[in-house]
Image (tube, grey):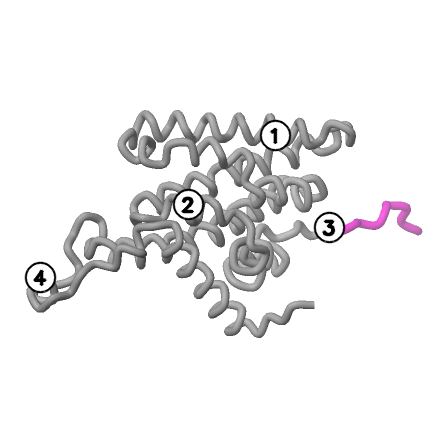
Amino acid sequence: MTSTAAPTVAPAPKAPLFGDEEKRIILDPLLDQNPITLQVLGICSALAVTTRLDVSIVMGISVIAVMAMANVAISLLRNLIPSKIRIIVQLVVVSGAVIIVDQVLRAYAFDLAKQLGVFISLIITNCIVMGRLEAFAMQNPPWRSLLDGIGNGLGYAWIICVVGAVREIFGSGNLFGIQIIPQAMYDAGYVNNGLMVLAPGAFILLGVIVWVLRWLRGYVEN
C-alpha cells in the first residue's frame, strides 16, 4: 500500500547570535573601522573630556549606552519612518536616549555629570551616533544594530580612555586620584607637563594615536 503522508521538512536552522558576521560587526570598530582613528569622527568630545580617566570612562559608557539604545530603536522603526523625515526621527530618538543617560548620571554620579556638563547633551549631535543610525540601523535588524552600537561605542570609548589616562598621568601625576609619579621625581626637579591639561596637548596625543594605529593596520589613504 502506497503511503500518502507528506514528506517531513526539516526546520530551517536559526541564525547564530554570534556568527562570523556578528563578531565582525562588534570587533571591526575597535581597530580596523575605529570611528576616531579611521573615520576621524567624534573628536571634539575626545579632546574636551579627557583630562581625567574617570571622566573619560563615564563619557565612553554614556556614548555606548546612547548608541545601543538609539540603534535598536531606529532598527525597530526603520520600516515605519518616512524617508523625508528620517533625520528628524533619528534626532528625536537620540535625544530621548541622551536624556535617559543624563538623568541616570545626575542621579548616581552627580559630580562626574557636572564635570561632563554640556558634552553629554552634545552626544545628540555626535557624528558617530548619527552616522551609524543612517548607515547601519536603518538597514539592519535590531540584534545586529545593537551589536553595531556597542562596537562603535567601545571603539570610541577605549580611545578616549587612553587619551584620558595619558593626560592625567603626565598632566597631574595622578590616576583616579592616586599619585602615580613618585615624589622622588618631583624632588629631583620633575614638573608636570602643563600641555597635557590643555586642548592642544589632547590634539597632539590623539594625532599620535591615530598615526600609530593607522601605521600598525597598514591603512593607506585612497
- Which callout, 1 or 4, points at the residue further toward the start of the chain? 1
List the residue tagged with mark 3: 12
Residue type at the position of mark 4: Gln
- Look at mark 2 in the image and give the residue it sits on: 60
Q: Quadrant of residue 190?
A: bottom left
Give the amino acid at mark 2: Gly
Between circles 2 and 3, the one closer to the viewer is 2
What's the distance in space between the residues labelled 3 and 4, CA to CA?
66 Å
Q: Mark 4 sits on what residue?
A: 183
Q: Nearer the viewer, residue 69 or 188?
A: 188
- Of helix, strand and loop, which one carries label 1? helix
Q: Which mark is residue 91?
A: 1
Q: Nearer the viewer, mark 3 or mark 4?
A: 4
Residue occupying image coordinates x 64% and y 34%: 74
Q: Amino acid at mark 1?
A: Leu
**Residue 113's disc number:** none
Q: Position of residue 205 (x, y in %)?
A: 40, 60
Q: Please report whichever mark, 1 or 3, sits nearer to the chain's N-terminal start.
A: 3
Q: Which residues are magenta?
A: 1-10
Nearest the viewer among 9 and 52 is 52
